[in-house]
Amino acid sequence: MNYFELINKCLVELNYKQVYSFTELTKNEHLKIKNIINILNNEICNSEKWNFLLRKTELQIPENTSDIVNPIHGKIASLLIDGKRYNYIDDFEKFFINSQPANTYTTFNDKILLPVFDKPQKAEILYYTSNFAKSEEGAEKELLESENDYSVIPEVFAEPVLVYGTCMRLKGNPQHIRFSYWLSMYKDALANLRSKLAVDAEYTPDIKMHRN
């Protein structure tokens, strides 16, 4: 389901009137639903090391260079140079005085800090993207904005977790006649997503639902 279809599915679940074009989404409840879908999509994507967020890129490192612009919009999972794994450390100051441990890297002010190499190197980077949406053409982006945008969560899982989670959060009242149903469907969908697509399935934090 694209963004517009998710919104309409929420309207149906909430017993609201469906709309027939994206431009009709102007009422206060419409805007809340649009916002909550994005909040929930981001929370779910940030909650785990999901395999659908994994991306790979290569980076050229010039000789005699200790820092390069960080091109990664996300979190680095692994960095290899010349087939060797480099481990992340927090102490960026060590790189300024070239006293860092061997085979390490760090980040500082949108830069990746590395040891100085005497010849050009190629780094292979595996990372978890922070772009949690994509356009109809497949271009990744941070948020769902346009009618035909999609969540990066695989569609079979995205519909139930986003629709039921959004309805539950919009109402935010356990006494609501359908709250228990939405909660049950959301939990089942999230558990199914975790069991199929979480890299570290045994170490999954809970997602706390907050009232909007």
Image (tube, grey):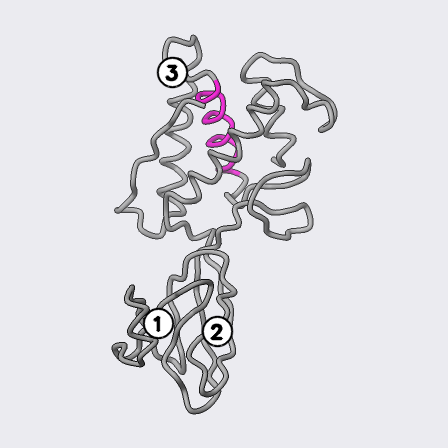
The x, y position of residue 105, in whole percent, is 35, 72
Determine whether the residue tagged by mark 2 lies in a helix, strand or loop. Answer: strand
> Which residue is label 2 attached to?
68
> Which span of residues is magenta-colored?
156-170
> Which residue is label 1 attached to?
105
* Earlier residue among tags 2 and 3: 2
Q: Is residue 148 or residue 70 the one in the foreground?
A: 70
Q: Is residue 126 above or below residue 97?
A: above
Category of crowding for the residue at label 2, using alpha-carbon neighbours closer than 10 angstroms: few (below 14), some (14–19), many (at least 20): some
* Earlier residue among tags 1 and 2: 2
Tell me where residue 28 sits by quadrant.
top right
Residue beneath the point at 48% across and 73% down: 68
Q: Tag 3: residue type? A: Ser
Label of residue 180 in the image? 3
Tell me where residue 99 sits by quadrant.
bottom left
Q: CA distance from mark 1 to mark 3?
A: 48 Å
Residue beneath the point at 42% across and 38% down: 43
